[in-house]
Image (cartoon, grey):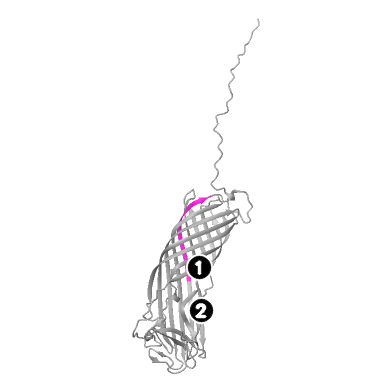
Amino acid sequence: MTASVTFAQAPVQPFAPPDNPPYVPPPEPLIPAPYQQSRPFPLFQLGEPDPAIPSFWFRGEYVLFFTSPAESLFPLATTGTVASRGVLGHPDTRILLQGAADYGTFNGFQYTMGGWNNSSATFGTEGSAFYLEQRARSFRYISDGTIPIFRPYVDATTATQTSSAVAMPGLLRGSFVAETRLKMNNSDSALLFNVHRDEQRAVHVLLGYKIVYLREELQLTENKVVLAPGALSFLGVPMAIGDTVLIRDRFENVTRLYAAMIGARGDYVMGRLSLNWVAKFSMGWSHARQYADGRSQLTTPAGPASPGGLLAQPTYAYRSSNDTFCVAPEGQIRVGYLLTPRFRAFAGYNVMFLSSVARPGRQMDMSINTSQSPTIGSGALVGVSRPLVPNNSTDFAVHGISLGFQFSY
């Protein structure tokens, strides 16, 4: 008996691909991170390379700045013949000291620090400041009496040009020294808003405030020695031969600017090279304090100091103030080179302008009442009250180069 086996054909099922989701490529980053490429760096590596958008940055710079020169509105020292007495307008008068005196270069330090406050790097904060060393200039004129030296002024009682002798043949020998000093610092703080960003460029807006401190001092010092009886008096009493008197005028101005600030900052990256620019505009309140102190003192024989010099007299307020509106535009530009993923070296140029500051050379009153001068009058005021505080203001500029580095994280 033969057995038979029958095979049933299974139904053919149509082919279907696996039920997998379609492939979606990863999203492109907003800004490619150029540091993430494998590049040899000339200096040491510090951990993993940073992304293109750092969350924190610090920039430190050495600055070499120049400022507006010290200045005076009228001559502080003259020479001429005995007949001319150094009076301004006389054909024999020659001016020894007037106008601008350049301070030269100021060494200083500037820093900028900031960071983004959100993960999308669209809102952050940034602050910057610079500090300059104090610089001084001095001008010294000394005569044994053969060459006349005078200090010109206007007699307030007669409104005429005249002068006070520092040295004069046969009568006085002496010296006149003018010293001026300046110190300045600046700081600002701002909110940072990103308004544009692509692979190479970024532009940000800054909103904040600025504070500027400017201090300048001018000191005028005379030292006179009597060569003939009656050539000079002190508080109305004639001085003897060999007597010495010291006369000092000191003017100090301190200006503080408190201002609201708006600005913009841009960055442009080309491989390792970068270009950074900053433009700021501030406007606000300029508060100027003026100090003046005049003293005259017999040093041979020694005696107490009496109030009043030549230009700084008791009628000139020891302390006064002046408040004005001020604007302060500022600009910076830097070219940098990437050394490591976190360090960038750069060189730049900065400029800042202040529209209204008080400076000693503009705060002196040339018109004086000599009755209150210890070496010309009796030391007591008689008549018109002069000198007075002029409350003048002027422009001021600071500019220069910077060299530094930036650390980003």
Answer with the quarter of the image where residue 153 lies. bottom left
Examine the structure image and report whether residue 349 is included in the region drawn in magenta: no
Q: Position of residue 312 (x, y in %)?
A: 40, 80
The relative height of residue 60 versus residue 83 in the rendered view (above or below) is: above
Mark 1 and mark 2: span between their CA atoms? 21 Å
Residue that label 2 marks: 138
Task: Measuring from the top left, give residue 186's x and y in whole percent.
Answer: 47, 65
In the image, what residue type sits under mark 2? Ser
Locate residue 299: give its quadrant. Answer: bottom left
Q: Give the magenta part as a residue range.
A: 183-197
Task: Return the residue found at the far top.
Answer: 1
Per the image, label 1 sits on a secondary structure element best described as: strand
Q: Is residue 64 above or below residue 262?
A: below
Element assignment for label 2:
strand
Residue 196 in view (yes/no): yes
Q: Earlier in the sequence, mark 1 or mark 2?
A: 2
Q: Residue at x 47, y 69 (%)?
A: 396
* Residue 341 seen anywhere in this rendered image of the structure: no
Residue at 48% x, 66% y is 353
Q: Image quadrant of residue 290?
A: bottom left
User: Tag 2: Cα neighbours inside 10 Å, few (<14), some, or many (≥20)?
Assistant: some
Label of residue 296 in the image: none
Residue occupied by mark 1: 398
Can you say whether 372 is above or below 395 in the image? Answer: below
> Toward the viewer: 386 or 235?
386
Give the prevailing secondary structure in the magenta stretch: strand
For the N terminus, the image quarter is top right
